[in-house]
Image (cartoon, coloured by chain):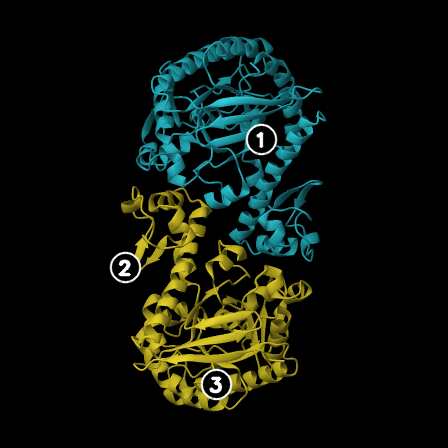
Chain colours: A cyan, B yellow
Amino acid sequence: MNSFKFELIHQSKRSRARVGRIHTPHGIIDTPNFVAVGTNATLKALDSQTVDDLGLQLMFCNTYHLMLQPGTETIKNAGGLHRFINRNAPIITDSGGFQVFSLAYGTVKDELKSRGQKKQDGSVLKITEEGVLFRSYRNGDSILLTPETSIAAQKDLGADIIIPFDELPPYHIDQKVLTESLHRTHRWEKRSLDAHLADRQNQAMYAVIHGGVSQELRTMSCDYLTQLPFDGFAIGGSFGKTREQMIEMLSHTLPQLPTDKPNHLLGIADLNSLEPGIQLGIDTFDSSHPTRCARHGLAFTKKGFVKLLNSANKEDFNPIEPGCTCLTCTKFCRAYIHHLFKAKEMTAYSLTSIHNVHRMIELMREYRQAIMLDEL
Amino acid sequence: MNSFKFELIHQSKRSRARVGRIHTPHGIIDTPNFVAVGTNATLKALDSQTVDDLGLQLMFCNTYHLMLQPGTETIKNAGGLHRFINRNAPIITDSGGFQVFSLAYGTVKDELKSRGQKKQDGSVLKITEEGVLFRSYRNGDSILLTPETSIAAQKDLGADIIIPFDELPPYHIDQKVLTESLHRTHRWEKRSLDAHLADRQNQAMYAVIHGGVSQELRTMSCDYLTQLPFDGFAIGGSFGKTREQMIEMLSHTLPQLPTDKPNHLLGIADLNSLEPGIQLGIDTFDSSHPTRCARHGLAFTKKGFVKLLNSANKEDFNPIEPGCTCLTCTKFCRAYIHHLFKAKEMTAYSLTSIHNVHRMIELMREYRQAIMLDEL
């Protein structure tokens, strides 16, 4: 059974931007849309009820973290992730590969900064054709992550959309090594797909297009992966050092993806990347940026960031954004939230996260409207 | 204008326990009741909307903390504490004295443990007939807290119920020094009352009965303070080292208070003290205990504490308390909350705080029912 379906509603006449609707077993995702990240099966500082009230259509959870805590077996015993966290709307999980390879090569940011000097911290014990052996940061256990174990974990979790196991090669890498990595990733993705199709369980699987900033390799990846029966396509791997490099890569890659399937940009949803991404035809964007900013006192408004800790807000009794319909703006003023940040009250993080997630959801609704009117 | 009124609904035939109703400018407080503490103008890990939804009838805010951050002037400019935090239900503030004297003598717990050896940390610079000069922990400013400045601050805050400035003498104190302290406290309370009555602003003021564990001094305090036109009576000062000492003190003191005015037990609302306190005729109890316990993973149930971090909850897919109608219990299972604590997610603190505050509110409702039926 596969109740996953992508419906194209409108293709803009002015760009590759499009409005669509992804049907999943747990409901609809209107696209383009923002996907909030709840690494540990919760958006930080928010509960599922609040997230439901916000109308978040797709939530991203991290398999790597959930494998280590509480363990995917526990979530399976709960009846899956939706029941465990009491969410009756779509969820996407990743393969765990991203986090494991971040341990090996450093985070994307650190690796870019390191000019290729970053060495692994010892958590990744061995990378073979079989998969990756790594050490749990929680209890020191050795864990083997392979295409098959990643998919088994994602079957336990039961998200609506799952991701095949892939390698995240660093930006600073020899073209020859990157090509070898790409081929291995393709073999891993094929094994992941086979493991998935052997027990589909009404989940959809998106391939992950790799190839770093090499146009040749991106084309090779599109050629190979679009031949396989994936339900959608995520763009992964290194996007380069700058937004311009990323946009160049996306401009090259997206026209090579089938237009009758949804696509997803992995880990990017900052405000400056959204519009070019949408114009290039991206359907969904995930990022922890809006909630992380919120916890640092950065609120999103139509006019840009507001630094809530800034003393200009001390006696500003207006909401973060006048006219905003989120709980935070309809109930609380900037001065109060400023005070809560100064007093280091967790309530500050919750209230600002509510606003930022609401703003992202509204922003994407505005983009969809603009596309419908061929204004984008 | 004074819209504050205490209405006695039922006096138990079996004890001094009574059911009442306190009318305030921002609504009714059914008594006996639990008063949650929101030191910095928020219950920790919760927002005012959630607290409203819980039905919390009286919230306790600390003048000392709000003087230092954001400053009572800012809250006055916001239109008072109710508007600042968007709460349309009763609030009580203290005088700031408790915190200042905790700086001088150590917290109640530390001071009891210290056997009188605890010395002040240097924050309190001078105690005179005028008041207390202390140093702000936030910016090092010298601040003079007197009956008049405390009341002025509480006028800025605009709570429904305010507290006169008093001294909190330590448990380990010479009877002669305690007697001198009591007389000074009485003079300070009278000055506070005068300052309050000169500009009532529809606030009510509760006196604070002092005298430590000395029956003679408690009687003296009741005699003096009940002659003054206070709207109610709080029991403060040292309650002794044990619950038995506290109950002995309350048994002695409460019959000396007028039954046509409400009373309040300052800082005590642990589950073991509530029932004896209610039986002795206490109307309201404030404590940060239920929310502090929540943040440490201790959930309150009818059968006692549940340690949510305990591994017994790892795969317990039942709510904290089956049948409980709080948001947390109707939506989430123990296994999920256990996981959130293990993953150090703030959501764990919020969900458990919601449950514990709900439980306290329900427990007090149960006590009121029992009193109505003369079962307590």
Within 10 Å of the Cα at label 1, are there few (<14), some (14-19), or many (20+) other Cα atoms? many
**Residue labelled with disc 3:** B182
Foreground mark, 1 or 3, reads 1
Asked which secondary structure carries label 2, the reply is loop
Q: Residue at x 43, y 59 (%)?
A: B291
Which three-letter amino acid code belongs to the residue tagged 1? Asn
Between the C-alphas of marks 1 and 3, the distance is 66 Å
**Residue labelled with disc 1:** A33
Asked which secondary structure carries label 3, the reply is helix
Q: Residue at x 58, y 12 (%)?
A: A256
> Closest to the observer: B293 or A153?
A153
Q: Is B219 above or below relative to A170?
A: below
Expressed as whole percent of the image width and height from the top left, the position of residue A166 reads 45, 19
Give the numbered dot on residue B303.
2
Which three-letter amino acid code belongs to the residue tagged 3? Leu
* Image side of residue A362 versus residue A96, left or right: right
Q: Are marks 1 and 3 in contact (CB under 8 Å)?
A: no
